[in-house]
Amino acid sequence: MTDHLIDARAPRDLHAFIASLPKAELHVHHVGSASPRIVSELAARHPDSQVPTDPEALVDFFTFTDFAHFIQVYLSVVDLIRTPEDVRLLTYEVARDLARQQVRYAELTITPFSSTRRGIDEGAFMDAIEDARKAAEADFGTLLRWCFDIPGEAGLESAEETVRMATDDRLRPEGLVSFGLGGPEIGVPRPQFKPYFDRAIAAGLHSVPHAGETTGPQTVWDALTHLRAERIGHGTSSAQDEKLLAHLAEHRIALEVCPTSNIATRAVRTLDEHPIKEFVKAGVLVTINSDDPPMFGTDLDNEYAVAARLLDLDERGVAELAKNAVEASFLDAAGKTRVKDEIETYTTAWLAP
Ligand SMILES: O=C(O)c1cccc(C(=O)CC[C@H]2O[C@@H](n3cnc4c(=O)[nH]cnc43)[C@H](O)[C@@H]2O)c1
Ligand SMILES: [Zn+2]
């Protein structure tokens, strides 16, 4: 990422600490992680698309007037992914970018429905992501796991197709750990997805819907009650409901906070108005994530720098945030211990006189 992305108000040493800190990323979208280089490469391959081929022009293309505009642009990038080789390239390159930021473990949200409805064969799609996952682990040491999400606005057909692909033994990829729900929330009530989440949960998947990103706290309650959410994507509007905050804290339901995303999609007006501080004050388990980093002009390191500034954290505080993400992840117990130990060892060495 380039220098303009750095939250310049965080101290330089803290940036250096964050850059080498081992991390976990729990909320990052597959297509939304395509770097400008990959987007322009795919756009050049498919000149009929409206996506610019010049990486510089992408900065303007990735400036959103509101959430609906963001989804429209997002889908134009989805349209660039047309072959299993495109899927493999994208996934492997996303892993490379994560590894560069010392991400040891990432749960990548993938929307298989959007690709298969555009003509990519289901089996070939699954093979492509799995092939990239294994190559990334071998080449970069970064563990990737998948969250398959329903693009809610695409209707119940998308829910049916997504849960089918997530639970059919002939298709379900080895790396799949969770089931999600994304896209716009307005006009897309969470309760209608209960039967699909029930089936995914019965098949052993964890429930991680987006909720309270662009609508109020009732959507978060709905995600908890009807979809049995174990973590909440964003959950920003939870800050408007004290009882909800207390419930999230008591039940250790982590929020996947993505500060810059909330500004880029205009869900929150300014970073200083972001409710992250209220979450921490209420005892909620807060994790820091990047969502669609190149589209939002950020990366995970920058999100940690933003969080450090908003929460007034030093290195020790930032390390605790990084451990929160490991704790809230779906890694097994041994894996969690390994990454948390790595964070601790790194932090202790950094702070040693
Ligand atoms: O694939 C289609 O044909 C289709 C038709 C209608 C709507 C959709 C979507 O809504 C796709 C949205 C898709 O957006 C993803 N996403 C990425 N970043 C975010 C975010 O910050 N907040 C919510 N959703 C996000 C997500 O993976 C959705 O499933 C598709
Ligand atoms: Zn998201």
Image: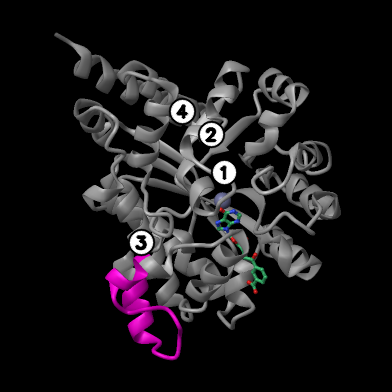
Q: Is residue 298 magenta?
A: no
Q: Are discs 2 and 3 less than 8 Å apart at CB?
A: no
Inspect the image, locate mark 2, and give the three-letter code of the amino acid beneath it: Glu
- Quarter residue 90 falls in: bottom left
* Distance CA(mark 1)–CA(mark 3): 32 Å
Question: Cβ of disc 4 within 8 Å of ligand 2?
Answer: no
Who comes first in sequence, dot 1 or dot 3?
Answer: 3
Who comes first in sequence, dot 4 or dot 3?
Answer: 3
The residue beneath circle 4 is 336
Q: In what quadrant does ligand 1 lie?
A: bottom right
The residue beneath circle 3 is 92
The residue beneath circle 2 is 273
Who comes first in sequence, dot 1 or dot 4?
Answer: 1
Q: Which residues are magenta?
A: 39-59
Question: Cβ of disc 1 within 8 Å of ligand 1?
Answer: no
Q: Are discs 1 and 3 less than 8 Å apart at CB?
A: no
Residue drawn at x 48%, y 73% as measured from the top left: 77
Q: Which mark is residue 203?
A: none
Who comes first in sequence, dot 4 or dot 2?
Answer: 2
- The 10 Å Cα crowd at callout 3, few under 14, some 14 to 19, many 20 or more, is many
Q: Secondary structure at mark 3?
A: helix
| Label 1 vs label 4, nearer the camera | 1
Q: Residue 230 at what x, y percent from top left? A: 68, 35
